[in-house]
Image (cartoon, grey):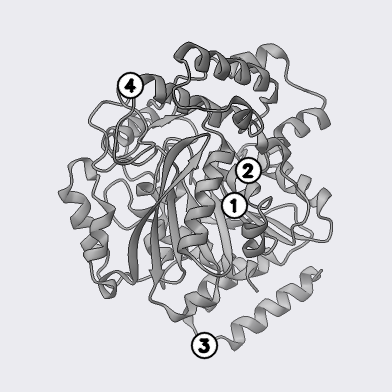
Amino acid sequence: MMQPMQGVCAAAIFFLCSNTAFAQSDDERIWPRLEDGNAVFVSVPESDFRSLGSAFELPDGGRHVTELANAAPGGAFDPRDLQDIAPEDLGYKADWVVERYSRYNLDWDIAGLRLTSLDPEAANHPWIVIINGGAANFYEFYVDLKNRPGWAQYLAQKLNVMVVSIPGNFKYGGWDEPTADPARQPAYLLDRDLSSEEYELRHMIYTNSLILQGLKALVMNHTSGELLLVGHSTSGELSMMAYEDPDLAARLQHRFLGWGSGGAARVEAIQAVREGVPPDAETVARRATLPLEVLERRDPEGYSDGYSGILNPMYEPGFTMRQVAENWLASEDRRRPNFKQQLQNWEHGDLLTLRARTEVRIEEHLLETGNPWGVVLDDVNKDLFATHYTRMDGFERMVWMTARWDTNHWNPDDQAKSPEIFVANEYRRKNPEADIRLINWDLPMTHYGHLELPRELAGATYSVVRWLDR
């Protein structure tokens, strides 16, 4: 493993040898910090972070995509229309790809927006595959809340990027029904609606194993070469599970990049045991209040803490975070799903004790309905909570990116107690020879920093990717 001082020297040599202004501005703010192998975490101050991404110029300034989004009701433009925009105007070639696949005797659709960079250097780096978390889809990574260029558009000036919408979370034209309306349901199949009984069943069997199968088909069929899977929020589980698949693992090359991603699902339980505070049954029950077949629907209250901040495009001076959240969800009500399956929550944290309850409820539903779909119960049962059994060893280089106001992953008041620090240290235990880093963007950026400062985050991400890829 490279020693910290040697790393700084190597980085300095890189800067001196490079003839690009980009390397002299962004990499010198990122790479020396990442080379500090003795640091539990490192921080990039606000002044440095805000200077990142200056080399990311969109040929048309983002005009064509913004006009397309502004013309669509609720901004829910048809991603297939991007293929009609000249790549020279975008800086990348845009393709909308959909994979239909079968699991549990049912068909599912997963979609991805593939952005093939026009920069010839992009072929020398991994494909960056961004996977939406719960209640979101590709839109929030591609455009901001005012339809201006988003994180993926900037990244695609330098890297090949695919932004994935997991099954159900994207619908052509968006949703007509308000978020709270029970009629607002996932588009598990993009060409048809389903019965209420089938929707409920699909909610209950929406395992991460099911999603990973579609993700693999999308990635293997529509990208080539090495990969970095960036699973935001709940989809961090998919990144971890991908290393269990031999085909994906061969392309991941023992590397990991996280943005608001956390670690394997069981890390939360490991932390509770190490710190002597395992959750009791009452705590678990409180975190599983909704029935398995009922969608969790987003509301302003839930988006007021840790998700909304002063950098949000909807913030105005004097606004409370509740007002920011209200304006945010209202502006995105059509194109953003704003719902999440309970099983996504249950497989994502210290809720393994709910496994038996899950099996029983699925069986009950199949008996109640007569199971006209021919779902084999044990095919589902073997997949339940697979997130808790992914291997945590075998990594060679890992970087988690966090932000000061991302309170799901960072503690701004007591940094030593930040969840992501425990996550990184747990992987260090299991990969003692690996280069494992945690880098914090030290400014009032939240879990949704890709909506807040997308250009700067793209500059930071590009530098981190190239450090991982050396």
* Residue assigned mark 1: 258
Mark earlier in primary sequence (4, 3):
3
Instruction: From this view, report whether residue 50 is shown above or below residue 190.
Output: below
The disc at residue 262 is: 2
Eye-nearest disc, 4 or 3 = 4
191, 403: nearer the viewer: 191
Amino acid found under the numbered disc labelled 3: Asn
Mark 3 vs 2: CB contact within 8 A = no
List x then y, in percent, for residue 214.
Answer: 50, 47
Q: Is residue 345 left or right of residue 318?
A: right
Q: What element carries label 3?
A: loop
Q: Which of the image's four quarters has the N terminus?
A: bottom right
Eye-nearest disc, 1 or 4 = 4
Q: How far apart are marks 4 and 2 (CA)?
A: 29 Å
The quarter holding residue 92 reads bottom left
* Residue assigned mark 4: 180
Mark 1 vs 4: CB contact within 8 A = no
